[in-house]
């Protein structure tokens, strides 16, 4: 059962020939394990060196290399997994991390504490996609943000999150904002007759992010928003371990990893599979045909990775946003299906009849589509 002591990861290598690709793959094996000439690695730890399992041709100058890593390189720390997968190799051109073995991620990482089934239970909603919007912009007072939260909640929207830019600014400090918005959402629920979840942004330094999570929960927040690329992805694990409320992950600061064809990390793996395994209950990603550059096939693959079977890890809600407008909601429901959260922001603010009416119309489309 030697294979139980190893896990595999896949890389895209840019090379002119298979021989060159094999050379680069061997360098990855060394760089991501012992990081020294193999001939000077002590004999009794030679087994710590990663090894090539296979190299396959993808397309012109592109090769897929599967590399086997001893689990001992990782130990039990999620951050060290990232270091082993793509630490020094991230600094070398023409190497892109594509995937890692799901069974090992399931073994090492906690997964979301709520996931799709848990969030549906909180809202008591089955059989349709969920709605989400963002409170913005920076510069409004807690009272002004709360008034917007009240109107969205009165209109029956499912989830209201802070904009990822709302932090602890003097115009709306964290504590005052959460107190005001929680109160406003609860008031709006009385008018709508349904549950609305409020997710404040808790992104700050790693140690303070956990404290801010606990403060948000104590003030009545229903979930939280965090940007793992700013706090460090292992923060997701820490929040999932507490497990009091769902965690929505935002991709701010991750673009340089995700948007290059020959470099970085494949977005479906990083956002859809890895962030899910680390503990994200909902994964926001930039939708296609908006102001970002992800293609439709890429978005669908992120969705698939969020929902795919991965042992006992809950599926996460894929949450496309960034350019979805009121008129296109039905299009995205048809493309992405019911196990999706549609994040619509600016388009709701543009509604000529105001935020409450915008939320009502948004909800009507989702509910009609789910029948």
Image (cartoon, rainbow, N blue to C red):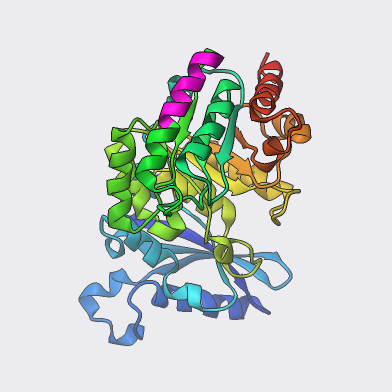
User: Is residue 302 visible to the viewer in this orientation of the structure?
Assistant: yes
Name of the residue lying farthest toward the left: 44
Q: In the figure, is residue 180 to the left or right of 73?
A: right
Question: Which residues lie in the magenta part?
Answer: 182-192
Seen from the viewer's position, the closer of residues 27 and 87 is 87
Seen from the viewer's position, the closer of residues 300 and 21 is 300
Vertical position of residue 296 compared to residue 364: above or below: below
Seen from the viewer's position, the closer of residues 67 and 290 is 290
Residue 293 in the image, given as x and y percentages of width and height: 71, 57
Q: In the figure, is residue 43 to the left or right of 307?
A: left
Seen from the viewer's position, the closer of residues 181 and 57 is 181
In the figure, residue 341 lies in which quadrant? top right
Vertical position of residue 187 compared to residue 277: above or below: above
User: Is residue 195 visible to the viewer in this orientation of the structure?
Assistant: no
Residue 172 in the image, given as x and y percentages of width and height: 44, 47
Quadrant of the snapshot with the C terminus: top right
Is residue 266 one of those drawn in magenta?
Answer: no
Q: Residue at x 34, y 30 (%)?
A: 220
Is residue 183 one of those drawn in magenta?
Answer: yes
Residue 260 in the image, given as x and y percentages of width and height: 64, 66
Q: What type of secondary structure mainly makes up the magenta span?
A: helix
Q: In the figure, is residue 9 to the left or right of 341?
A: left
Q: Residue at x 66, y 18 (%)?
A: 367
Residue 169 in the image, given as x and y percentages of width and height: 43, 54
Q: Residue at x 49, y 15 (%)?
A: 190
Vertical position of residue 236 compared to residue 367: above or below: below
In the figure, residue 224 lies in which quadrant? top left
Q: Residue at x 53, y 18 (%)?
A: 125
């Amino acid at each position: 059962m030697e294979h139980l002591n190893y896990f595999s990861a896949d890389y895209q290598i840019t090379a002119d020939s298979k021989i060159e690709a094999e050379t680069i793959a061997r360098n990855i094996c060394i760089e991501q394990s012992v990081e020294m000439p193999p001939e000077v690695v002590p004999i009794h730890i030679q087994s710590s060196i990663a090894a090539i399992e296979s190299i396959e041709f993808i397309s012109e100058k592109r090769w897929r290399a599967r590399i086997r890593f001893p689990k001992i390189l990782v130990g039990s720390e999620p951050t060290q997994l990232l270091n082993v997968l793509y630490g020094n190799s991230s600094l070398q051109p023409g190497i892109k991390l594509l995937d890692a073995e799901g069974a090992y991620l399931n073994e090492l990482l906690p997964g979301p504490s709520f996931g799709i089934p848990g969030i549906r239970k909180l809202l008591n909603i089955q059989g349709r996609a969920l709605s989400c919007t963002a409170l913005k912009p920076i510069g409004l007072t807690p009272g002004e943000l709360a008034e917007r939260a009240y109107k969205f909640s009165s209109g029956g929207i499912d989830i209201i999150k802070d904009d990822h830019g709302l932090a602890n600014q003097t115009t709306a400090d964290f504590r005052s904002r959460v107190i005001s918005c929680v109160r406003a959402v609860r008031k709006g629920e009385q008018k709508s007759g349904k549950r609305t979840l409020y997710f404040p942004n808790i992104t700050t330094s790693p140690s303070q992010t956990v404290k801010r999570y606990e403060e948000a929960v104590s003030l009545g927040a229903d979930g939280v928003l965090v940007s793992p690329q700013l706090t460090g992805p292992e923060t997701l694990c820490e929040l999932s371990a507490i497990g009091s409320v769902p965690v929505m992950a935002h991709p701010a600061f991750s673009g340089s990893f995700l948007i290059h064809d020959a470099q970085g990390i494949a977005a479906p793996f990083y956002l859809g599979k890895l962030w899910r395994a680390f503990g994200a209950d909902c994964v926001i990603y930039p939708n296609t045909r908006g102001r970002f550059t992800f293609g439709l096939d890429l978005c669908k693959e992120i969705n698939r990775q969020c929902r795919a079977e991965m042992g006992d890890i809950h599926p996460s809600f894929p949450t496309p946003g960034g350019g979805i407008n009121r008129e296109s909601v039905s299009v995205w429901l048809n493309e992405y299906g019911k196990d999706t959260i549609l994040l619509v922001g600016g388009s709701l603010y543009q509604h000529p009849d105001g935020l409450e009416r915008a939320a009502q119309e948004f909800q009507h489309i989702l509910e009609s589509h789910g029948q």
